[in-house]
Image (cartoon, grey):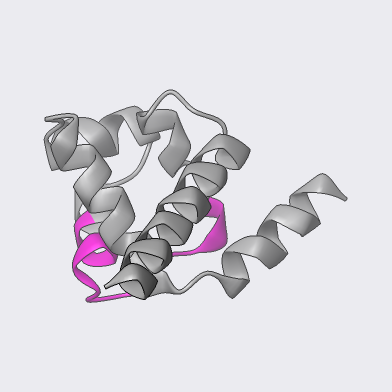
Amino acid sequence: MKFLLLYFIIEKMQYYDFRNFVRLKREKLNISLNSFALNCGLDSATLSNFETGKSDILFMNITKIPKGFNMSLGELITEYENSQKAFLHIEKSQ
């Protein structure tokens, strides 16, 4: 049931923003794409195509991304949602 709820949340995310969030977080932590992909258990081409928007990513692969940040999927989703709330708050105040 928990897995299904996480799937629903990810389905509702805007992929473009989540892609950028993952890429920017990875770059901020100064982790190379190849190293990050290896830590996640993903092919670097798959991750690159996801981050650049050249292709979508399978849900089972999205669940591997938090491993590269040493986080749970729930923690990564929460951080992503909080970043979106902060962005929307800044947008409203301008």
Compare residues 39 and 77 and report the one nearer the observer. Answer: 77
| Image quadrant assignment for residue 52 | bottom left
Residue 33 position, x and y percent, is: 15, 42
Residue at position x 77%, y 57% in the image: 5
Q: Residue extending furthest right? A: 1
Figure label count: 0
Residue at position x 48%, y 43% in the image: 79
| Residue 56 appears in the figure | no
Q: Residue extending furthest top? A: 70
Residue 50 position, x and y percent, is: 29, 64
Residue at position x 81%, y 46% in the image: 2
Q: Is residue 71 left or right of residue 33?
A: right
Q: Is residue 66 left or right of residue 7?
A: left
**Span shown in magenta:** 48-60
Residue 83 position, x and y percent, is: 41, 52
Compare residues 57 and 15 and report the one nearer the observer. Answer: 15
Residue 65 position, x and y percent, is: 42, 42
| Image quadrant assignment for residue 51 | bottom left
Residue at position x 49%, y 28% in the image: 71
| Image quadrant assignment for residue 32 | top left
